Amino acid sequence: YGIFYMGKEWCPKCGKETTLILAQTPLELNAASPELEQYEEAAAKRLGTLMTKCEWKEHELGSASFKLHQCDHCSAEHRVRRESPQSEFRPCSKCNCRALATQSETLKPAGPYTDGLARTSSVCKFCHYSTEATHVIPKLEEKANTKSKHQGSFGGGQTSGGGAGSSW
């Protein structure tokens, strides 16, 4: 995980603009100096003290990313949490950590005349809560016939502009 330094947020304490001092996102840095590495290490430790165990798990799974901001006015530090919309993990109904992985399997496929059956299993990678449910897969509908039994013909009549006409 890399670190980058840009962006503005608003301080929840005083409402003034803040400066991003650390962001943990899947971003690689091209160049690193010893001073930058020391700063990153110190800032990462500071961000770590502000994150819960659940947030560390979300960070590890990539279901959320975190940024540390410092207020330019009152010097307060706060973290900003952003959920990853492309993550496969969802919030757990027990612990609310975004670490719930869901998997579905078809037990019996649906046919044209019979319903099918599927099982959905979910496991939280943080609190280990698990749930399993089965549900019905509706039977397949017959494909609509492209031709009707009583297909009629209306002929190929033509219409032309017509309208009311008169001559003088």
Image: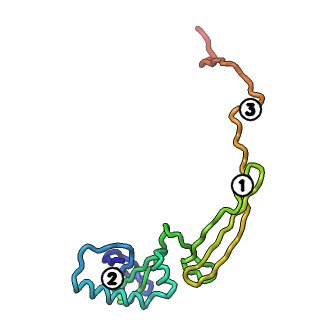
Give the mark nearest the N terminus, 3 or 2.
Answer: 2
Instruction: In this rendered view, identify the residue nearer to me: 22 or 105.
Output: 105
Residue bearing mark 3: 148
Q: 162 left or right of 27?
A: right
Task: Kindly identify the amino acid type of the residue bearing the numbered disc 1.
Answer: Ala
Q: 10 Å neighbourhood of mark 2: few (<14), some, or many (≥20)? A: many
Q: 10 Å neighbourhood of mark 3: few (<14), some, or many (≥20)? A: few
Q: CA distance from mark 1 to mark 2?
A: 54 Å
Image quadrant in which you'd find residue 72 = bottom left
Image quadrant in which you'd find residue 77 = bottom left
Q: Quadrant of the N terminus?
A: bottom left
Q: Quadrant of the C terminus?
A: top right
Q: CA distance from mark 1 to mark 3?
A: 26 Å
Give the mark nearest the N terminus, 1 or 2.
Answer: 2
Instruction: In this rendered view, identify the residue nearer to me: 124 or 113.
Output: 113
Q: Is residue 40 above or below residue 151?
A: below
Task: Kindly identify the amino acid type of the residue bearing the numbered disc 3.
Answer: Ser
What residue is at 77 percent from the left and 30 percent from the top?
149
What residue is at 60 percent from the left and 69 percent from the top?
103
Could you tell me residue 97's position as x and y percent?
55, 80
Could you tell me residue 38's position as x and y percent?
27, 88
Q: CA distance from mark 3 to mark 2?
A: 69 Å
Could you tell me residue 153's position as x and y percent?
72, 22
Q: Report the number of discs.
A: 3
Q: Which mark is residue 102?
A: none
What secondary structure is marked by label 3? loop
Mark nearer the viewer, 3 or 2:
3
Residue bearing mark 2: 21
Check if mark 1's residue and mark 2's residue have beta carbons within 8 Å.
Answer: no
Residue bearing mark 1: 110
Q: 10 Å neighbourhood of mark 1: few (<14), some, or many (≥20)? A: some
